[in-house]
Each structure stands twice: as C-alpha cells, then as structure tokens.
Amino acid sequence: QYPMCENDNYLFDLEENETRRFLGSLEAFGLGYTVYHRWICAFVCTFGILLNCLHIIVLTRNPMRVYIINNILSVIAVCDVTTMASYLIYLVKFKFHEDESAYGHSYFWLVFLLAHVVSSIALHTVSLYLSVIMAFIRWNALDRLDSKWVKSRSIGRIFFVTFLFVMLISISNLAVHDIVPTKEIFRDLNINGTKINLENLYTVSLRDLALDNECVIFKSQLWLTGIFFKVIPCMLLLWFTVALMIKLYEMSRKRRLLRRDDTRKKSAVDKTTVMLIIMLTVFLITELPQGAIAILNAIYTTDVHVNVYLHIGELLDLLSLVNCNVGFVLYCCMSSRYRHTFRSLFLTRLEKTKASRKDVISAFHNLIS
C-alpha cells in the first residue's frame, strides 16, 4: 500500500499470518456490514428525529423548563435532531443513490458533504460537552437544592461558549480537505474502451498543504479530533459520574443512619445509580473507540486509515447515531415529572381523541338504527 505521509509509521506487520487474517476479517466485516448500514442508519435517524422532537416538546413545557438540566437536555436534543437530519440527507444522496455518480458529484453536493461533516462533528461534540456540564451540575447540586446551578438561566451563554470552542477546532477539517475536479484525479478514464465524461464532476481530496512535512497538519487535526472531541469529554463524564455515584452512596448511608428507612430510599438510589451506569457505559462504548482510532490514525496514518477506518468507519457512525437517541430513553426512566408531562401532553390527549371518536361512532349508529 502506498503511504499517505512521508516516513509514516506502520502498526501492522503484513508478513504475519495472524495479522493478515485479522485484517481480512475486518475487511470482510466492512463489506458485509456496508450493505445494511444505510438501512439501519435510515431507521435510527427517522425514529430518532421523531423521538427527539417529542423530547424537545416535553422539555420545553413550563413545568420542565424551570431547571437548567432540562434546558441543557433540550439543547442536546436539538443538536441531535440536526445531526440525524443531516445524516439522513447524506444517506439518501451518497448511499442510496451512490451508483448514479460513481466517479464524482456536483460541486453543490460536495459543499453539502463538507458542511455535513463539519457540522455533524461539531454538534455531536457540543452534545458531549453539554452532557459533561449536565453531570457537573447534578454532582454540584445533589446535596444543595438551593445551588445556583439548579435554576440558572445561563444556558444561552453555556451553549454559545461550548459551540464556539468546538467550531473553532472543527474548522480544521476545512483546512485538511478540498473539493477538486474528478478529471484531475482520473485523467483520460476509459472503461472497456469507452472514455468516461468527467466534466462538472468533483470529488473530495486531501489538500497538498495537509500532507506536507510528513502530514503535520493532517495528523494534528486527527489528534485534535481524538483528544478534544472524544477522549476529554468521556474522561470528564466518567469523573463526574463516578463522583456523583459516590455522593449518592454517602447520602444514602447518612439517610439510613438518621431515618432508618432502608428499603425505599435504597431502591431509589439504586435506580438512579443503574441509570447513571447505563449512561456512562453508552458514552464509553460509542465515543471512546472513535477517539482511540482517531489517535491511532494520527500515529499510524496509512495503516489505520486503509486497514481499519475504511472498514469500520460506518459502524462508528452508527454508534454516534445511537448515542443521539439515549437521552429520551434514559430520561423517561429517571424522571417521574418527565413521564407525567409526557403522559399529559400525548397519552391523555390521545385517549380523549379515541373517546370522542367512539362517541361520534355511537351517535352515528344510534342515528341510523
């Protein structure tokens, strides 16, 4: 394989049989999974957009809007809806209709593709950092109900600072990639003696500047993505979640000593702890592998990109999309106020609609009988 960067490091020894078998398995997995990826992700995005829209409606009701945690959750849901909507458009154009443009796309669609990549990375990372902020607020306010964070109105400033920080780093993607005419890549392309017309077709390529000096800019961008967008938010979330569970345990122990009310309080703490462990596990499973691969890609650029990322990149996309749908499920399980608001907004109205429909049908039967 041709090295992408000068003096590139190599992770795999292709002379070893075990290594070749492992890489062959990865390639076979990638070829097998890619057939189903677009359908799975289309379902996850469609279903996720619907769930998160319901999530936003519930969280923006007056009883829910009082607390900053709910405001942060609604902003996260908006970020997730935007990410999934953008990915759905990407799927329709570049996956479901990929055979229509095997050698390139129009300039407009490649501008969309780069915008999709930058915005998706930025919005998803904003969601991760807002989750970290949410974990910090919960940890800070757990034993202090009068904490200034609980009913803080500073969600706008928190979002703006987080979004600005993430966007400044995300712009580095534009410094790495460029839109170039396809005919500059494939000159005089012929298939079975027929010359392929490549006019007005474009493709995305790495800039020469990004590959200069042993790919210093390209590798720096991979380091930034891996560390700032994946590893740091996951480590912070791990830290605050563990600290929160420790504080929950200490409060539970003190409560049992004071009230001797073991059973009911213990079950409440256990339920919250289980939800926190699930939240932590989902974040680690979906985000840390992407950070690890991004860092490995920065160190062993050609090896990891060609032998690993190209085969499991779509699976990593799916994990990020799954992460976009965690908030609704977890909050339904954790918050009785949320379930009550959801029930009053949707289920009660649905029952009233069904009841009124039955009354109309009954009146119609009485009229004709």
Image (tube, grey):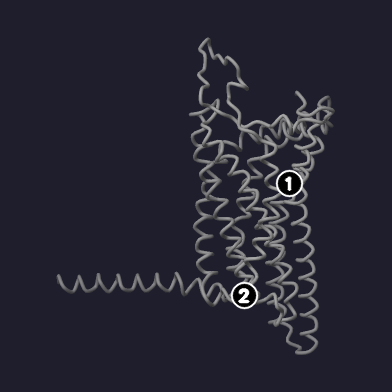
What amino acid is at disc 2? Tyr
- Tell me if mark 1 has few (under 14), some (14-19) or many (20+) residues whose alpha carbon lies within 10 angstroms of its own: many
In the displayed image of the protein, which residue is found farthest to the bottom? 259
- Decide if residue 321 is on the left or right side of residue 253: left
- Is there a contact, CB below 8 Å, between mark 2 and mark 1? no
The label number, if any, that marks residue 225 in the structure image: 1
Q: Secondary structure at mark 1?
A: helix
> What residue is disc 2 on?
67
For label 2, the SS is loop
Please name the residue shown 84% across and 32% down the image.
9
Residue appearing at x 51%, y 44% in the figure? 89
Counting from the top left corner in percent of width and height, residue 358 is at 29, 71
Residue depicted at x 78% and y 30%: 212
Mark 1 belongs to which amino acid?
Thr
Q: Which quadrant of the rendered structure holds the N terminus?
A: top right
Q: Which quadrant would residue 48 be assigned to in this image?
A: bottom right
Closer to the camera in the image, 93 or 185:
185
Instruction: Using the image, determine if residue 212 lies above or below residue 242.
Output: above
Asked whether 271 or 233 is in front, the reply is 233
Q: Quadrant of residue 77?
A: bottom right
Give the Cα separation between the discs numbered 2 and 1: 32 Å
Q: Mark 2 or mark 1: which comes first in sequence?
A: 2
